[in-house]
Amino acid sequence: MLRKTTLFLLFALVTAASTAQQLSSPVLDEYIRQGLANNPGVTARNLEWQKSLESIRLAKSLSSPTVQFNATYTRALGGRSIDLPIGDLLNPVYMALQSPQRVENQSIQFLPDNFQETKFKVAYPLFNSDIKYNRQIQQHLADSKAAEKSAYEYQLRYQITIAYLRYLQALEAEKIWANAKNVLSELRRFNESLVKNNVATRDIVATADYELSKADNEIFKLRSSQNTARAYFNLLINKDLQSEVLIDTSLLHRNLPRYQPEELIQYALEHRQEFGAIEAGIQASESARRLQEANRRLPDAYIGGEFGFQGYGYTFDHDQAFALGQIGVTYDLFNGGQTKIKVQQARLDNERARNQLTETRQQIAMQVTQAWNEYEAARHTWETAQTGLKAAEETFRIVNNKYRASQALLLEFLDAQNRVTTARLQVSLAWTDVLIREAELLKAAGM
């Protein structure tokens, strides 16, 4: 059964790793590996799983014989006693026989004084249904812990991936604003030349300076957002919050695959980690039911024995040696219907777990459907944003040429330039949203 649990974990890790293959890069894969190795939540669940494995070993050990060594020594003062008139009974006889021998009356103390008992005690269960089914229950609980551990690791993979994508998006947004700043810097130089040649007044330079200050402010805010995003990412992989994060922009420049919702739903119903935990719970409740039914029908049997020495003072001779053996059978003839109630409770727990399995299947199918719809909507939004960017860039190209030919106002130039910057930011945000929605879709599908 332990081998079964190990294989289950390996299978869960393989299926979880397929998400990284869909949204994969060497840098991100390494960060995910670090997160799984160092995250406190993973460590806690791994300890819980290991503890459940120890519970299996403990349950197995209950079917083995036990040997105990016990040694006691007793000193007693006072307490109750009983008087034995041995002298009163025997001395008249001795006198009648003209024997000089005499005996004294005796007072025997109830509490043993200077008494020792040194022994070994052996016990072995011949048959005990509790031991058999408890071992099965512990195995199913360990399988459940393994599934929970795998589900948490899968969730952490998703969180690390999303945090990394958001950090990359913040960097891309800074690049867009840096490009806008370069355009505005070129505009300021051009406006300076117009003022020097007395073609325009000084206010156009001041306007350009103001637009540059706004770009600087946006870059400052983005860098603050980057610091926050970097700190959260490092938190997930349990590193110093200010640690540098390696950049791999290949994730932001990849072809989007097409997904079929029916195939994703089917895959999810076969591979989601939640099913492993629920099915383990069903098996555990079934074992609990069989346990209670066995208690109704079958007795418990055991053998045991003791051997050692007991007596007054430590002599360890044949007078103090003793040995005894036992064989026993226990069976509840009547316990007020407790066993019957426990059987019914176990049966209800099993039905509840099976109902939870059906409900979970429906919920997961809905999750995949919703995630697929959101992914497709994000794709459409991104495609629309690209169309808007092309239109904004073409408009800016025309307005820029007209402005340099003194055929357009500065306000028209700035409006066209702002439209380009906004359109580029919208495309960047839309693309990041597509990748996030894709990750959510794969997560819902258990891939």
Image: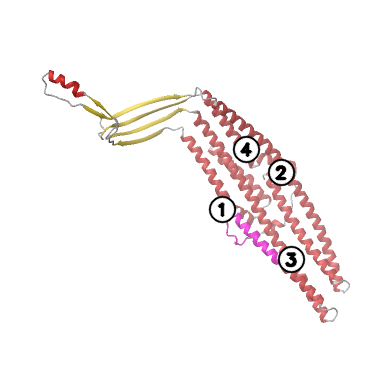
Going from N to C along the chain, the mark reached first, 3 or 4, is 3
* Residue holding disc 2: 367
For the residue labelled by badge 1, is the local secondary structure a helix, a strand or a loop? helix
* Distance from the alpha carbon under mark 2 to that under mark 3: 37 Å
Look at label 3 and name its amino acid: Trp
* Distance from the alpha carbon under mark 2 to that under mark 4: 18 Å
Q: Nearer the viewer, mark 4 or mark 1?
A: 4
For the residue labelled by badge 4, is the local secondary structure a helix, a strand or a loop? helix
Look at label 2 and name its amino acid: Gln
How far across and how far down the image is residue 205, in percent? 79, 76
Q: Dominant secondary structure of the magenta stretch?
A: helix
Left or right of residue 12: residue 90? left
Residue 38 is tagged as: 1
The residue under the point 65% across, 47% down is: 18
Going from N to C along the chain, the mark reached first, 4 or 1, is 1
Left or right of residue 57: residue 432? right
